[in-house]
Image (tube, rainbow, N blue to C red):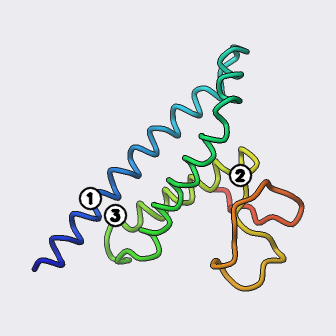
Amino acid sequence: MKNGMRRDRVSAQIARRVRWSLAGLVVVAAFAGTSSAEEFKLLSQSQTRTIVGLINAWAVAASQCRTGDPALRLTLEACTTAHQFQVKLDDLGWCHGRESDPGGLFFRRWHRCDSDSFHPKRP
């Protein structure tokens, strides 16, 4: 019984982190769409922090997606969220893995996109 309660608590914590990360993504998207040069400059100065934040949020969602119970709605939401973060990062010029990487996901790393990069499927 304790493990079930602990798992529920951890799942709730992850869900909160994913929701906060999505809120941050909305803020980033709002700044990126602005026409004000000053606000664009602010985004450029914090771009590293933004990219790291998005990658961290992706990692939380991707971890829940990989390790969660496939029968749970929370796991499906985590997988969808991880994909959304990957698409947003791709839009910002950051890719996860290259065609030349040996093996599966374990060897993939985040990097600036280039001609050999994997790109997420788009809906």
Q: Earlier in the sequence, mark 1 or mark 3?
A: 1
Q: For the residue marked with disc 3, what is the amino acid? A: Leu
Q: CA distance from mark 1 to mark 3?
A: 9 Å
Nearest to the observer: residue 1 or residue 77? 1
Q: Which residue is mark 1?
A: 12
In the picture, the quarter occupied by the C terminus is bottom right
Residue plotted at (29% across, 64% down): 11
Q: Secondary structure at mark 3?
A: helix
Residue with the most extreme right position? 115
Say above or below: 70 vs 52. below
Q: Position of residue 41 (x, y in %)?
A: 71, 22
Q: Which of these two is toward me, 72 or 29?
A: 29
Which circle marks residue 90 in the picture?
2
Residue topped by disc 3: 74
Q: In the rendering, which numbered label is found on residue 72?
A: none
Report crowding for label 2: few under 14, some 14 to 19, many 20 or more residues within 10 A (C-alpha). Answer: some
Within 10 Å of disc 1 (Cα), the crowding (few <14, some 14-19, many 20+) is few
Farthest-out residue, bottom: 103
- At a point 46% along the width and 61% down the height, the residue shown is 61
Image quadrant where residue 115 sits: bottom right
**Distance CA(mark 2)–CA(mark 1):** 28 Å
Secondary element under disc 2, as helix, strand or loop, is: helix
Specify which label sits upstream in the sequence, 2 or 1: 1
Q: Quadrant of residue 1?
A: bottom left
Percent from the top left, x then y, of residue 104?
67, 82
- Local crowd size for mark 3, using a 10 Å CA cut-off: few (<14), some (14–19), many (≥20): some
In the rendered image, residue 74, in percent from the top left (x then y), is placed at 34, 64
Residue 25 versus residue 4 in the image, above or below: above
- Amino acid marked by disc 2: Asp
Q: Residue at x 41, y 77 (%)?
A: 67
Per the image, label 1 sits on a secondary structure element best described as helix
Q: Nearer the viewer, mark 1 or mark 3?
A: 1
